[in-house]
Amino acid sequence: MQQNKQPIVKKLVLIGGGHSHAIVMKMFGTKPLPEVHLTLISAASKTAYSGMLPGHIAGFYSHDECHIDLQPLANFAQAQLCIDTVVALDLKNNKVLCASGLAVDFDVLSIDIGSTPATISVSGAAEYAIAAKPVSQLLEHWRELVEAVGKNPHEPISIAIAGGGAGGVELALSMRSRLHQILHQTQQPIQNLEIHLFQRGQELMPNYHSSVRHQIQQILTEQGIKLHLGETVCRIAPITPKETKEVFEIKCESGLKVECNKIFWVTQASAPEWLKTTGLGTNEQGFILVEDTLQSQTHPQVFASGDIATMVNHPRPKAGVFVVRQGKPLFENLQRILLGKPLKPYKPQKQYLSLIGTGDKRAMSATGYAYATRGTFTLPPHKLLWYYKDCIDRRFIEGFRNL
């Protein structure tokens, strides 16, 4: 008597709820593979959409408006969601090891965990600075700061931001906008707020054309943000508290010293430490080296996308636009490897449109302003550009609701 053979179930595990993986999950919900068991491991149940994060800090969006809830997304994809932190990989036995002690088996693995700001080389940065990632911790510190200013708006406050790339610039503008709103509403002088922006190089946003760099520097200066260009932070140390506030001293290699109450760290990106022990092929910064198929150079059962990955043949800046664009080709190649089909190469675009919010609600209106830049082409800040950016961002996030 012939017995029916049980189908072979393959295990696909996704580490991280980044933009690429959110798209992959949504597409698996639309085009499922019945014989694939899908698991998503994420340190948090909600993932922030980077395009709306500066707007959230500026007070344009609520927390829920700029976050993707991973549980409904996992339900839609018929996937298991594990809220846990990955601490190691066993690539000989194909296991993901988590902080809780959970070990998750996989046949195919994909990693989209973003990056973290590099703080290791600066004395005191790890202890006293607030890293831009993970985003959940950044937002918790920001919420506490906003509440403190709201309760005591008459007390002067000084904020420092280390890192003059696009992330640091947007953070400075967004924080200034939100805190100025509070001071305006409570009829306190805006002089109560100081924001310092430190940049190692002589130019802000070095990956952008000189036209946008010049305009950004001009608007930062006009809004009273104190720029420290060509200054490399080398030490952060606490000072005896003045009254009830924490006060820190930032020291630069030039000898410049600045006192502040909060330091936000938005410097060059790096990879988490646990990746170094996995045996995966990485570059000097620890990012996973992947082929045009988004497949690891050294381990064909592993894929990577987003900031944690570096395409060997097509290196690109760590920008959200590339993470989003990788979602579909990653999904297609994950399905192809599970079905035993040849993989398809993906080539990212060289130039891309950047819409950079100024964080500015001029005349306390409900409308923000944004720059637009692509290659050598730059448009100055305008509310219509903000409206365009807002529409794009809201459309993206709405795609993950009411699945």
Image (cartoon, rainbow, N blue to C red):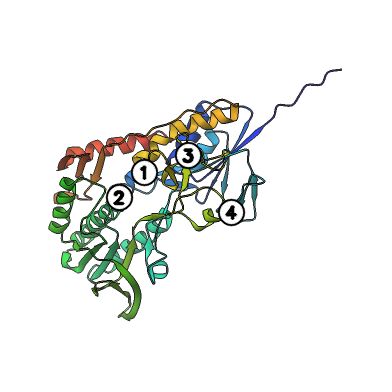
Q: Nearer the viewer, mark 4 or mark 3?
A: 4
Can the viewer see residue 207 in this picture? yes
Residue 392 location (% of width, % of height):
30, 35
Q: Residues within 10 Å of mark 3 (few under 14, many from 20)?
A: many
* Residue name at image x 18 percent, y 40 percent: 376
Label 2 to label 4, Cα distance in Å? 32 Å
Foreground of the two, 53 or 113: 113
Which amino acid, mark 3? Answer: His
Which amino acid, mark 4? Answer: Ala
Q: Which residue is mark 3?
A: 21
Label 2 to label 1, Cα distance in Å? 12 Å
Label 3 to label 1, Cα distance in Å? 19 Å
* Residue name at image x 42 percent, y 52 percent: 115
Residue 398 location (% of width, % of height):
38, 35
Q: Which residue is mark 1?
A: 65
Image quarter of residue 154: bottom left
Foreground of the two, 255 or 37: 255
Mark 4 and 1 residues: CB-CB less than 8 Å, in contact?
no
Can the viewer see residue 401 in this picture? no
Q: Which residue is mark 4?
A: 88
Taking the view exactly as shown, the residue that stands out farthest to the bottom is: 240
Which amino acid, mark 2? Answer: Pro
Q: Which residue is mark 2?
A: 54
Task: Say which quadrant the N terminus sits in.
Answer: top right
Image quarter of residue 255: bottom left
Q: Going from the N terminus, do you reach mark 4 or mark 1 first?
A: 1
Q: Residues within 10 Å of mark 2 (few under 14, many from 20)?
A: many
Label 2 to label 3, Cα distance in Å? 22 Å
* Residue name at image x 50 percent, y 50 percent: 44
